[in-house]
Amino acid sequence: MIGLATVRKVPPRLMLGEVKPVADAKTLEALAAHRYELMASYAREVRAACAAEMSRLKASGQQAAAEKLQKVRHWMHRDGDKVPHALRVDIEKARAEHPSLDKLLTMREELRQVWTRTNVSGEQLVADLQAWCQRAESSGIKALQEFSLKLRAAHA
């Protein structure tokens, strides 16, 4: 408040440039360096997809299904070990009832696996990232397609 504190170090910001035709080693490097920011962005996409699905359910008169989804939507984008045990069954039911949300969550876990595997060569990780982007873009889910473009535009 009185100006005595100064910021010494700030976390690096994700830089987005031109969208590359395919992901490369620089994209993988950016993914590893900015994984927390990217996964927070992915979580926002999942929450937005949940909100859109709830709106669709309410508009079609399926209020009970929308309420079930409302109950678990704050936990759907989390890792399985972070979810309260009482909600795990409800989340699995919601995933079974809504295939597009299930696809989003499955792809999230696959993307997380790209940087957690340390016993694989860099070339294999780049190939896995390229395959993930290709599957995301061919999924037909708008949130996945946009996120894949964002990944391919990232650079370190």
Image (cartoon, grey):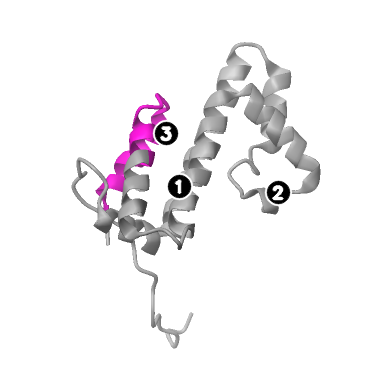
Disc 1 versus disc 3: nearer the observer: 1
User: For residue 137, which quarter of the picture?
Assistant: top left
Position of residue 97 relative to residue 156, above or below, is above
**Residue type for callout 1:** Leu
Query: Which residue was labeled with disc 2?
Result: 83
Among numbered discs 1 and 3, the one appearing first in the sequence: 1
Residue 68 image point, x, y percent? 72, 28
152 or 25, which is in the foreground? 25
**Outermost residue toward the bottom in this view:** 4
150 or 99, which is in the foreground? 99
Position of residue 126 relative to residue 96, above or below, is below
Task: From the viewer's perspective, tell me whether residue 32 is left or right of residue 52.
Answer: left
Is residue 18 within the magenta segment?
no
| Residue at the image point whose x is 55% and y is 30% from the top | 101
**Magenta segment boundaries in residue numbering:** 132-154
Q: For mark 1, give the secondary structure.
A: helix
Q: CA distance from mark 1 to mark 3?
A: 14 Å
Query: Which residue was labeled with disc 1?
Result: 111
Q: Residues within 10 Å of mark 3 (few under 14, many from 20)?
A: some
| Residue at the image point whose x is 62% and y is 50% from the top | 79
